[in-house]
Image: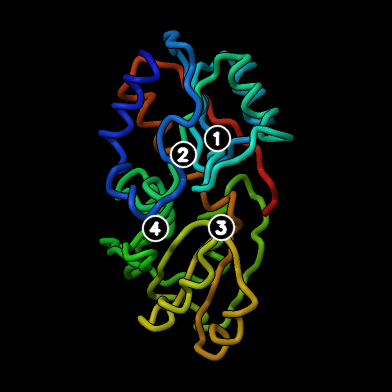
Amino acid sequence: MTSRKLDAYFRSLLDLEGFASMDPSLNGIQADNDGAEITKIAFAVDACLETFKRAADSGAGMLFVHHGLFWGQPLRITGTHRMRLAFLLNHNLALYAVHLPLDQHPSLGNNVALADLLGIESPEAFGTYHGRKIGYKGTLSKPLTIEEALKRITFKDRPPLGVYPFGKRESLSCAVISGGAADESLQALDEGIDLYVTGEMSHQVYHQALEGHLNIIAGGHYSTEVWGVRRVMEHCAAQLNLDVEFIDAPTGL
């Protein structure tokens, strides 16, 4: 399996082209190898020296991440950016990144994974971002306290960034958008949702959520975005004759 074949596979699996006009994240191969065969893929949330080194040490020929190195602006090859690229090239490690297509994917994405963990029945698209809905919402299979909801989505028992029990004791409906989607809580408020789950909270929406009686869990940007990466990893393990490994490098944020 080469990086080019894997690129074709991931593009058939995840809607990279459908997000091309709205996601500046340079989804796809961000750093290629020299054409060598890849027998193992490592998976991580973030592209950084720590995940690069651990991927190389594990014998992986490709690292698949949610947060890559390029975000729509050209970068000078200096400082830490140079160090990162030099490591990838020196170790012949290909880097593959998928941002918004991984958040939104209806079966492998971060948001549908959170919806499943919470027990959202028949999830519907939610949360307009640059003209496209990337999250999910719906009725919960059973009423959940905010404490019960938090237990369901916690990764490795890590504490959330914040819990804001502003609404009902038991929520009947829920909307989810992983990562940095605090502003989209206002859409949940407008739609009469009981509980909103995201990665981070924002000062500017605090009082509107409080006054609108919306429960919010800010589970952490990292912790709410391990799920899609892990689902893609599990899918690859089942469908491709390749070794896989998840590299857990939490930021606490």
The answer to whether the residue labelled 2 contacts the one labelled 1, judged by CB atoms less than 8 Å apart, is yes
| Mark 3 → mark 1, Cα distance in angstroms | 22 Å
The image's mark for residue 115 is 4
The answer to whether the residue labelled 3 contacts the one labelled 4, judged by CB atoms less than 8 Å apart, is no
- Horizontal and vertical percent position of residue 103: 41, 51
Q: What residue type is labelled 3?
A: Lys
Q: Is residue 7 left or right of residue 153?
A: left
- Horizontal and vertical percent position of residue 93: 54, 19
Q: Read off the residue under disc 3.
A: 151
The answer to whether the residue labelled 4 contacts the one labelled 2, judged by CB atoms less than 8 Å apart, is no
| Mark 3 → mark 4, Cα distance in angstroms | 13 Å
| Mark 1 → mark 4, Cα distance in angstroms | 21 Å
| Mark 2 → mark 3, Cα distance in angstroms | 20 Å
Q: In this view, does 70 lie to the left or right of 242?
A: right
The answer to whether residue 18 is above or below residue 196 is: above
The answer to whether residue 171 is above or below residue 48 is: below
- Horizontal and vertical percent position of residue 241: 35, 15
| Mark 2 → mark 1, Cα distance in angstroms | 7 Å
For mark 4, give the secondary structure: helix
Its colouring scheme is: rainbow
Q: Read off the residue under disc 2.
A: 229
Mark 3 or mark 4, whichever is nearer to me: 4
How busy is the neighbourhood of tag 2: few (under 14 within 10 Å), some, or many (20 plus)?
many
How busy is the neighbourhood of tag 1: few (under 14 within 10 Å), some, or many (20 plus)?
many
| 3 or 1: tag closer to the N-terminus | 1
| 3 or 4: tag closer to the N-terminus | 4
Residue drawn 47% across and 11% down? 34
How busy is the neighbourhood of tag 3: few (under 14 within 10 Å), some, or many (20 plus)?
some
The image's mark for residue 44 is 1
Mark 2 or mark 3, whichever is nearer to me: 2
| 1 or 4: tag closer to the N-terminus | 1
For mark 3, give the secondary structure: helix
